Image (cartoon, rainbow, N blue to C red):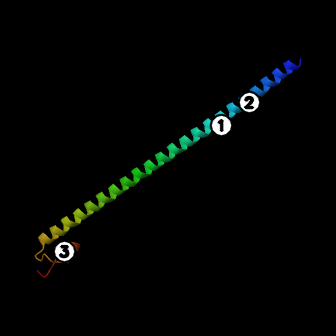
Amino acid sequence: MMMIMMIVILVVVVKVVVAVVVVVVVVVVVVVVVVVVAVVVVVVVVVVVVVVVVVVVVVVVVVVVVVAAAMIIIYNNNNNNSNNDNNIDSVLGYRNLSS
């Protein structure tokens, strides 16, 4: 009778240990999955921010180049239409009325 009780106690202890191990493994797996998902989200956010910054920089550079080119074209056009090539007012669109 004592032997049967020992076997029953041993079976119960083994079941409890197995249950605890299973719970610990499940918790560890869930934590690892959450950490991996968080890292992936952070990487995606960083990539999106970098892409947005690059696009903004490219747009700003293109706008600056286009505005500079337009100013040079306007300046050259005004100078070609003016009798005085050194007339800085021609950049602003004023005409030298004395010439």
Which mark, by number, is residue 91? Answer: none
Question: Marks 1 and 3: in contact by CB < 8 Å?
Answer: no
Query: Is the residue under label 2 in contact with that under label 3 (CB below 8 Å)?
Result: no
Q: Position of residue 12 (x, y in %)?
A: 79, 25
Spot occupied by residue 18 in the image (x, y as percentages of width and height)? 71, 28
On screen, residue 52 versus residue 63, left or right, reads right
Q: Please tell me which of labels 3 and 1 falls first in the chain.
A: 1
In this view, which residue lies farthest toward the right?
A: 1
Q: Which element is circle 3 on?
A: helix
Disc 1 and disc 2: Cα gap in Å?
Answer: 15 Å
Residue at 82% in and 25% down: 9
Q: What residue type is labelled 2?
A: Val
The residue identified by callout 2 is: 17
Q: Position of residue 17 (x, y in %)?
A: 74, 30
Find disc 1 in the rendering and name its residue.
Answer: 27
Numbered disc 1: secondary structure: helix
Check disc 3: other Cα within 10 Å, few if <14, some if 14-19, many if 20+: many
Q: Which residue is drawn at 57% across and 42% down?
A: 35
